[in-house]
Image (spheres, rainbow, N blue to C red):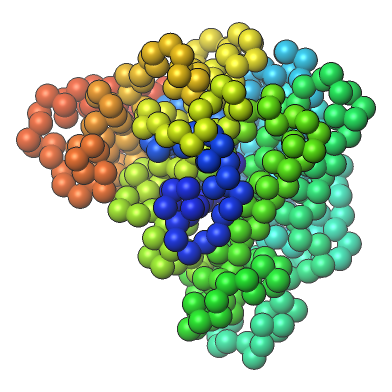
């Protein structure tokens, strides 16, 4: 799962500037899901929804509720996933799988009930805390319950500005980089774990969850990757004035981060080939939400969302429609596409069905196996539901045949009466509010929006809770 990757930021989904050959290969060998949606508009709730198969109106985690501060001595972690939640990892363990997670967790800090090793994972390596993950050169990562010190890095804040451009690229690296690049440490651990599991326990199947931190800000990537992109892309330096760290070549750095992520996907695919596991492995690629709007990201230059409206942190299409690819040799047709309307809650029942496991009760997701394998007719969602309690507070719904209608309440905090309706089949860019022209659809959406949530005191939305 990528972090803040926009809908059109990989080649298979229309990207023209950023090179993603391995993801494009994955699409050639599998299926692209053109109308797949994230569970939420930001990191933590999306991760909780993916893990539990329950949408944002029922999820125990609906926003980025922090469990500490920003300094190097501050407690780490976000609000923990409760102990009684049944996660996708626990479903795999129930079928005898070895389970590993590598990357950004965001569902509970050290020692909490939400720690991945308490949520079904045999092995974990990466960032437990999303705030720490803003810096790609941290002082440490976590291996299970132990700190793994990165001795070649020193502490510095991932949120700094400079008043004017530094003299050289090297000057930026000296101030805003280190010797141990965390994404490289993480992918190395992941590949090593997969190899060791295969060699030591060859008959034990594996479930690997790889929530990479890329391309979430800050703009940090080894210089050799930056240098693969044109120097004339960047006429000016990014000085950190819109959050996160400065960079002398922000467009090149952003593209380089995505290409580096793609390279790591390729390393996983190559290892599957080497170990003879490719033909018996389902690979799912997706993103946790749309592209960011701060920190030097230039969405217009990269056409990050195409004609889709909005970005990370919003329930417009650009904030939640995400590039998604599935490869399953012999079961999923190569170079196929599907416009089945689906979202992150669907992966728990889908993968449970694929391995013959009984999914937990009370899920909001449905199995996508009919879509993926072309077997039985796909039972469609009656609706897809979202709510987001941060910022201006939002609520959204996709419903109707083919996922035609989109209702959104985009300003619940300050304007709870604002209600909009869009025909996504005719207007995927959500440019024309047609609520007044379709009173029956608007009324139906209002009923579902009112009914399809359980209030959560940790993530209140006053306009909905009172």
Position of the N terminus by quadrant? top right
In the rendered image, is residue 417 in sight?
no
State the residue lying farthest toward the left: 437
Would residue 83 be found to the left or right of residue 295 on screen? right
Q: Tell me what residue is drawn at x 71 percent, y 68 percent.
A: 222
| Observer-nearest of 142 and 351 | 351
| Observer-nearest of 73 and 183 | 183
Q: Is residue 231 above or below residue 320?
A: below
Give the image location of residue 192, x and y in percent.
85, 41
Q: Tell me what residue is drawn at x 56 percent, y 65 percent.
A: 254
Q: Tell me what residue is drawn at x 34 percent, y 44 percent.
A: 317
Q: Quadrant of residue 132?
A: bottom right
| Observer-nearest of 155 and 165 | 165
Q: Quadrant of residue 273?
A: top right
| Observer-nearest of 375 and 162 | 375
Give the image location of residue 178, x and y in percent.
78, 69
State the residue lying farthest toward the bottom: 167
State the residue lying farthest toward the right: 200
Give the image location of residue 354, x and y in percent.
60, 16
Q: Is residue 143 above or below residue 298?
A: above
Would residue 392 be found to the left or right of residue 364 on screen? left
Position of the C terminus by quadrant? top left
Q: Tell me what residue is drawn at x 81 percent, y 48 percent.
A: 188
Q: What count of labels does the image hold?
A: 0
Give the image location of residue 422, x and y in percent.
20, 39
In the rendered image, is residue 202 in sight?
yes
């Amino acid at each position: 799962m990528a972090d803040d990757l926009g809908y059109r930021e990989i080649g298979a989904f229309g990207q023209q500037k950023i090179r993603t050959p391995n993801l494009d290969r994955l699409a050639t060998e599998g299926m692209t899901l053109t109308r797949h949606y994230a569970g939420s508009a930001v990191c933590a709730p999306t991760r909780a929804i993916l893990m539990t198969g329950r949408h944002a109106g029922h999820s125990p985690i609906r926003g980025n509720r922090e469990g500490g501060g920003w300094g190097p001595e501050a407690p780490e972690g976000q609000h923990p996933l409760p102990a009684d939640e049944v996660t996708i990892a626990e479903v795999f363990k129930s079928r005898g799988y070895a389970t590993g997670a590598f990357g950004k967790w965001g569902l509970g800090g050290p020692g909490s009930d939400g720690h991945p090793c308490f949520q079904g994972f045999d092995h974990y390596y990466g960032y437990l805390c999303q705030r720490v993950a803003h810096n790609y050169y941290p002082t440490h990562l976590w291996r299970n319950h132990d700190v793994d010190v990165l001795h070649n890095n020193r502490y510095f804040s991932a949120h700094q500005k400079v008043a004017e451009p530094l003299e050289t690229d090297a000057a930026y690296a000296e101030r805003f980089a280190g010797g141990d690049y965390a994404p490289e440490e993480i992918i190395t651990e992941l590949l090593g774990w997969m190899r060791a599991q295969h060699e030591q326990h060859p008959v034990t199947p594996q479930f690997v969850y790889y929530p990479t931190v890329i391309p979430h800000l800050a703009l940090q990537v080894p210089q050799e990757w930056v240098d693969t992109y044109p120097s004339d892309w960047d006429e000016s330096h990014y000085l950190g004035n819109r959050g996160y760290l400065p960079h002398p070549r922000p467009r090149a750095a952003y593209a380089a981060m995505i290409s580096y992520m793609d390279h790591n996907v390729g390393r996983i695919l190559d290892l599957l080939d080497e170990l003879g596991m490719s033909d018996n492995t389902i690979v799912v690629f997706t993103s946790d939400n749309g592209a960011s709007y701060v920190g030097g990201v230039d969405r217009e230059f990269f056409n990050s969302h195409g004609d889709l409206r909005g970005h990370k942190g919003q329930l417009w299409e650009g904030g939640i429609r995400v590039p998604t690819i599935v490869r399953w040799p012999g079961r999923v047709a190569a170079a196929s596409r599907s416009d089945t309307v689906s979202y992150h809650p669907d992966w728990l029942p889908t993968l449970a069905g694929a391995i013959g496991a009984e999914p937990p009760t009370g899920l909001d997701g449905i199995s996508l196996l009919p879509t993926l394998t072309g077997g039985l007719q796909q039972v469609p969602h009656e609706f897809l539901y979202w709510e987001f309690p941060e910022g201006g507070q939002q609520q959204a719904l996709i419903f109707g045949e083919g996922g035609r209608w989109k209702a959104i309440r985009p300003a619940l905090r300050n304007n709870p009466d604002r209600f909009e309706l869009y025909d996504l089949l005719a207007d995927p860019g959500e440019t024309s509010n047609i609520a007044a022209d379709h009173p029956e659809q608007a009324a139906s959406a209002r009923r579902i929006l009112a009914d399809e949530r359980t209030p959560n005191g940790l993530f209140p939305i006053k306009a909905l809770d009172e």
